[in-house]
Image (cartoon, rainbow, N blue to C red):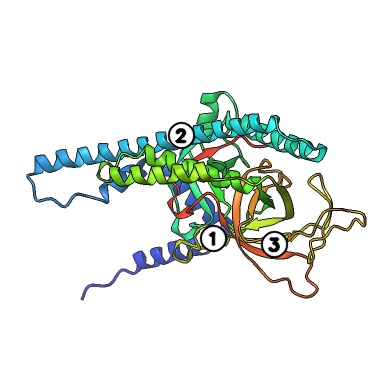
Amino acid sequence: MRKIDYRSYIFLTGIFFVLFSFSPDKSLILRQMTISAFSCFWDRIYLLTHPLNLSTPSAAKQEIETLKQDNYLLRLQVDHIQEWLLSEERIHEQMDLLKSMSNLGSQESEKLFLQRRCQEIRKVLQLKARAIPAKVIFREPGSWSNYIWINVGEADNKHLQEVVIAKNSPVLVGNSVVGVIDLIHKTQSRVRLITDNRLTVAVRAARGKQQDHFLLEQLNALIFSLEKSTNSTCSHEMQEAISALTRLKAQFTPVNQNMYLAKGELQGTGRPLWRSCGSFLKGTGFNYDFSDKEGPARDLRSGLTYEKDSKLSSVALLNVGDLLITTGLDGVFPAGLHVGVVFKVDILQEGQCFYHLEAMATAGSFDELNFVCVLPALK
């Protein structure tokens, strides 16, 4: 009877024991090294794992497979160009907004408000002028709501002869926050998403013109995307949709009032792919207990100011539909960027000194991120 050799089993058991005994930090480093090592093969691996199921001769099948791969790479390039064009369109919109705001304002308080908005827009435009577009190349299911990997890194800084890709560089889609770079390699970088529960974004509620401008941005982006679509089978329906959206845009009447209200923090859920909550964010610490450049402090429940002789009326500090924008107080994201839209405000309990809320990210579905824009880190 042949004697069983247990050495291979003992060796494998030892390997598994060592792997499972790694600390979370070391296992994360090991995964990062593996991801970086295979980054150049990801597109090819995707193509090889999606073969054509055709009963054709081998030569014809090989030719079709080659054409399919070329078509896939061309589609990626077209999507990249469309996203870049859309980003350029949004930059022009921001410049037009800056020009229009510079000539508005009759009262002194309104002039000061518009001056602050102009400063914010000017700062964001200066950063966007140095921004780098990037493509999402990998996403681990176990940390689906936490990280994405993009195809830019230290080599791009050397090519541009300036540091754009750096730790804490904000990552956007249009004018909406997606996340921040927290790890850099030579040709790829890791982005921590705002849906990660360990990334906190300082925001405040904006109501009035800021909301209307955000809606117009979304309309313009949708019209632009439909006009650039290459789907010829739906051309008639697309033309009707574009006409309807254009009429809606023409009939849109923005309000004249501007209000910046409750301030707080937003975090994500940080769940894996199989428990993903999409683009939902949690807000906490929202109040207006201290006055600032945007206005006086207000009572949490009544919305009245604490000043006795104030002529300002009562206003709700938070409403469903309020736009949440960055304040710049976290030192990572410049002020004035879009983060989320409030869709639920929790009831204020007795003795509670701030509101909790739930919001939906303005960047759209985080499950379908393809292209992003990286801004230089704030100094």
- Residue placed under numbered mark 2 in the picture: 84
* Label 1 – label 2 distance at C-alpha: 41 Å
Check residue 290 in the rendering and tell me which mark sits there, or answer none.
none
What type is the residue that disc 2 sits on?
A: Trp
Q: Residue at x 55, y 29 (%)?
A: 157
Marks 1, 2: nearer the viewer: 2
Q: Residue at x 49, y 49 (%)?
A: 148
Sequence-earlier tag: 2 or 3: 2
* Label 2 – label 3 distance at C-alpha: 34 Å
In this view, 202 is above or below 72: below
In the displayed structure image, the side of residue 330 where residue 171 appears, left or right: left
| Any part of residue 379 in sight | no
Check residue 22 in the rendering and tell me which mark sits there, or answer none.
1
Q: Residue at x 20, y 76 (%)?
A: 1
The x and y percentages for residue 105 are 74, 35
The x and y percentages for residue 138 are 43, 48
- Residue placed under numbered mark 3 in the picture: 284
Give the residue furthest to the right: 308
Tag 1, which secondary structure?
loop
What type is the residue that disc 1 sits on?
A: Phe
Q: Label 1: how many residues lie within 10 Å, few (<14), some (14-19) or many (20+)?
A: few
Q: Which is nearer the eye, 331 or 46? A: 331
Sequence-earlier tag: 1 or 2: 1
In this view, 39 is above or below 296: above
The x and y percentages for residue 45 are 31, 47
